[in-house]
Amino acid sequence: MTEQNATTTTAAPRRALPPLMTLTDRAAQRLEKLYQTNHAGHLLRIAVSTKGCSGHAYDMSFVEQAGPGDEVVVDKGVTLLVDRKATLFLIGSVMDYEVKQLESGFTFSNPNEKGRCGCGESFHV
């Protein structure tokens, strides 16, 4: 009788991926308010378009439902969509809502950005 050598291979533990996007409390509250009023029945969709002096810009629009190329992100009880083509640009980003003296709007803190244009409308990675 021969003894067979049984080798057990174990896969290395997978490193947890960072969330695709997260929302600050202000962004979640503002988005929830928009979903309850002017944009009821819609979802915010975030994409990255090729434009601006630095090459890329955030593109946000309200849509009725997720498309086949959309990733669904749920944070703080609020759902938003991310265009699958934009995921590599947005991994780890934090969306905030800022109110300033003359303007207000959603802003992004994106760890993938290497720089922005002077006016702040576009970025490059």
Image (tube, rainbow, N blue to C red):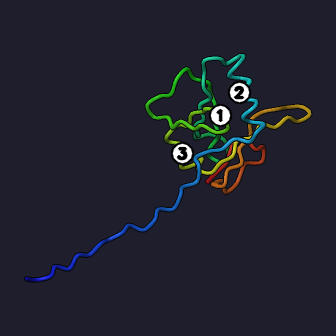
Count of numbered tags: 3
Q: Earlier in the sequence, mark 3 or mark 2?
A: 2
In the picture, measured across the screen, residue 18 lies left or right of residue 103, that is: left
- Residue at position x 73%, y 48% from top? 117
Q: Quadrant of residue 48?
A: top right
Mark 3 is on which residue type?
A: Thr
Q: Earlier in the sequence, mark 2 or mark 1?
A: 2
Extreme bottom residue here? 2
Q: Earlier in the sequence, mark 1 or mark 3?
A: 1
* Quadrant (top left, top right, bottom left, bottom right) of the C terminus: bottom right
Question: Mark 1 packing: few (<14 Cα in 10 Å), some, or many (20+)?
Answer: few
Question: Mark 3 packing: few (<14 Cα in 10 Å), some, or many (20+)?
Answer: some
Q: What distance separates the C-alpha of mark 2 from that of mark 1? A: 9 Å
- Relative depth, front residue between 64 and 54: 64
Extreme left residue here? 1
Residue that label 3 marks: 87
Say if mark 2 contacts mark 1, CB within 8 Å.
Answer: yes
- Residue at position x 38%, y 67% from top? 11
Mark 1 is on which residue type?
A: Gly
Residue that label 2 marks: 32
Mark 2 is on which residue type?
A: Glu
* Quadrant (top left, top right, bottom left, bottom right) of the N terminus: bottom left
Residue 84, relative to residue 16: is it above or below? above
- Residue at position x 76%, y 44% from top? 120
Question: Mark 2 packing: few (<14 Cα in 10 Å), some, or many (20+)?
Answer: some
Question: What x and y, as percent, mark residue 39?
Answer: 67, 19
Say if mark 3 contacts mark 2, CB within 8 Å.
Answer: no
Q: Which mark is residue 77?
A: 1
